[in-house]
Image (tube, rainbow, N blue to C red):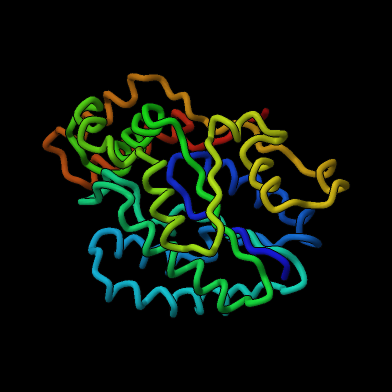
Amino acid sequence: MRQILLHPGFHRTGTSSIQHFLWLNRDVLSPHLTIRLNRHFKPLAHRCHRYAQSQNPLDLTELISALDQGFAENPVPTDRDLIISSEGLCGDIPGHQDIQDYSAAPALITYISGYLAERFPDATVRVLLTTREPKSWLSSAYRHVLRRNRITMPEEDFVAQYAQAGAFDQIIAEVAEAISPIETLYLPLELAQTAYLGPGGAVLDQIGIPDHLWKALKPVGIGAQGAAPHIWGQFLAMNRSDRSDEEVTAQKEDMAEAAKLGHWRGA
């Protein structure tokens, strides 16, 4: 294996587009590149989420067994490069439960990248962090948390409370210092969207693939980001209602499905 590119987030920075693109094209890429995503490391992501909530160093010790489990269940060939893309590996999204920021990310990424360097000593390990303009990120994070959780604050309060979570330059610097000499790369969503084949193509640019493969790759189109603004107001009203959590969750998911949130449309 020549190189490993670890893409552990951040949330709401084009990660779904990247992962959808990589999985759609996995067969075309397979002679040169192995793809591992959220689905391959669910127990690991669960432990990363738990550490983000607890920040208890003892929770870090369980990452190794979860990584061992992931590679045992989904072995990777060593005759090709490897991309691991899962935003869950930087913790959980700020605003979920008691998580205020990405302060858990440096420790998590240090453990995971160090494990990869030790398990695959002949490969060059690099970490790629995708980012997003803070104002846009905070708005997207709010909508995500509003749908998934029962928060009752308006968006302006969320933005004020979690502004520091969108300070990606600071957290990237902390990650880079923590994992050195492993290289840290960063890719703003605004730049990735201009790349050939979009964010997924921009990630492939970081690892490099043979020229002939580019012609065979399929675009994924655009995620259904643009639900009508009223739906977010309805989610907030439901969160503030006296209905049970189960009722609110079910109704929000029905509305999300009707609005095709998270669906993809053609390019």
* Any part of residue 250 in sight: no
Q: Nearer the viewer, residue 61 or 22?
A: 61
Looking at the image, residue 225 sits to the left or right of residue 104; the answer is right
Q: Position of residue 7 (x, y in %)?
A: 54, 54
Asked if residue 181 is positioned above or below residue 231 in the image, the reply reads: below
- Image quadrant where one finds the C terminus: top right
* Any part of residue 130 in sight: yes
- Image quadrant where one finds the N terminus: bottom right
Q: Residue at x 61, y 46 (%)?
A: 20
Q: Nearer the viewer, residue 232 or 111?
A: 111
Looking at the image, residue 122 sits to the left or right of residue 245; the answer is right
Residue 140 location, quadrant = top left
Q: Residue at x 43, y 58 (%)?
A: 177
Residue at the far right: name it. Answer: 212
Q: Position of residue 52 (x, y in %)?
A: 30, 59
Q: Position of residue 219 (x, y in %)?
A: 71, 37
Q: Residue at x 42, y 49 (%)?
A: 173
Q: Nearer the viewer, residue 98 or 260?
A: 98
Looking at the image, residue 104 sits to the left or right of residue 73; the answer is left
Query: Number of numbered discs present?
Result: 0
Q: Position of residue 67 (x, y in %)?
A: 49, 74
Q: Residue at x 69, y 48 (%)?
A: 204
Asked if residue 138 is positioned above or below residue 214 in the image, the reply reads: above
